[in-house]
Amino acid sequence: MKKTSWYAVILNAVCAFFLGCSFAGEESAPTEGVPVRVENLRIDNYFVQGKNVQIFTEVPKRVLVVGDNETETLIELGAASSILLAAANNDGPFPMKEENARILETLPRAMNQQLHMEYVMQARPDLIIGNQYCFTRNSLGSTDYWNAHGVKTLVNLSSSQPRRHYIKETVAQEMESIRDYGRIFHAESAAEHIVQETYDCIDEINEKAQGYPKPRVMLIELMSTFVSYDKSKLAGNMAEQIGAEAIETPAVITFEHIAKEDPDVLMVICSHAEYGVCLQQIYEHPGLQHTKCVQNRRIYSIPLSYTYGPLCHTIDGIKMMAKAFYPGIAIE
């Protein structure tokens, strides 16, 4: 009996060892059939209505993705085969990576003008990914409508209305959104690579900028009025992640606000075709001639796509800010 007991103990130990090794090796791999829970937002006519929990029991196979950043992020994750339609143009001054642009050319495309509810319903997507502005009366309506019809929705958390400062947007949230994409499409490793590369870049900038004075900055966009992206918006949080002070302001400002705050650096977020042209009217404004940013020629452009729902391009926005904040800094 003793001999049999010892054999049983040894056999159980060997089994436990090999089973343990097997389980340990499988931890990082996505598990089929395990639901993925994602906390997102309910949007109606570009207004946030609250939280929206989406449960994914399988990898989406018919994805309508709206926006260049959203599309390129899916391509970066290796999820291009899940895209039913991509509303992406890749025609701005800062295009996609060449390899991603080539993949985009192979995908079925839709124009933004086509994105009304009847057209999308006929396409039968199982998931819609886009910025919050996609869900308006003249476009996709509300996330509730699509969820009620069995279509899941993912909206970018950092794409709230520029004229409102009511939701805190952070780099950490943006990185978590990328991780959510990774879990949904079983591409955790690729997602984590993007996230880690972004955080490594922030660490590198902060280390190399130690000898520089930390600037007070304002980040604005020229719309029908001036819109300010302070520390409550993603652009402001990006600036603060690399040591700058993003000056707190109302959402809508005037030239007088800029003159009063007198920032060291002014970043102008550009969304129009004439990228960078808007700087000249600021340099020439008579009420700003005394400001440090005008006198020291420290007004810079940055594309909207690097600050508003940037996803995989968050790192590019951070690098562009660093070069403006810390002249001469070398960033890999």
Image (cartoon, helix red, strand yellow):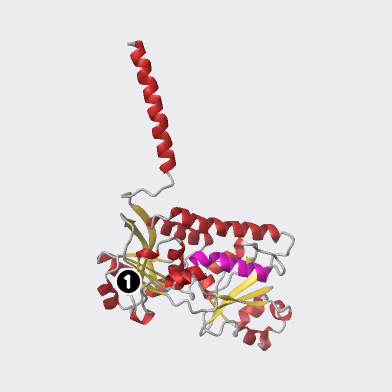
Q: Is residue 276 visible?
A: yes
Does residue 24 appear to the left or right of 196 in the view shown?
left
Q: Is residue 160 visible?
A: no
Q: Nearer the viewer, residue 165 or 146?
A: 146
Does residue 245 appear to the left or right of 93 in the view shown?
right
Q: What residue is pinned by disc 1?
A: 142
Does residue 66 appear to the left or right of 329 in the view shown?
left
Q: Which part of the image, by quadrant, shows the N terminus? A: top left
Residue 125, quarter of the rendered image: bottom left
Q: Please state the horizontal and vertical placement of residue 104, each as a whole percent of the image.
A: 43, 72
Segment tinted magenta in the rendering: 309-325
Q: Please state the horizontal and vertical placement of residue 281, each as a whole percent of the image.
A: 63, 87
Q: Which part of the image, by quadrant, shows the C terminus? A: bottom right
How crowded is the residue under tag 1: few (<14 C-alpha within 10 Å), some, or many (20+)? many
Q: Please state the horizontal and vertical placement of residue 250, each as a whole percent of the image.
A: 55, 74
Name which residue lies at 56% across and 60% down.
Answer: 198
Q: Provide the major secondary structure of the magenta segment.
A: helix
Q: Is residue 174 above or below residue 132?
A: above
Q: Secondary structure at mark 1?
A: loop
Residue 274, quarter of the rendered image: bottom right
Residue type at tag 1: Ser
Name which residue lies at 57% across and 72% down.
Answer: 249
Name which residue lies at 25% across and 67% down.
Answer: 149
Q: Is residue 95 above or below residue 209?
A: below
Q: Please state the horizontal and vertical placement of residue 134, each as a whole percent of the image.
A: 38, 74
Q: Nearer the viewer, residue 251 or 316?
A: 316
Residue 322 included in the magenta stretch of the image: yes
Name which residue lies at 71% across and 84% down.
Answer: 289
Residue 112 included in the magenta stretch of the image: no
Residue 247, quarter of the rendered image: bottom right
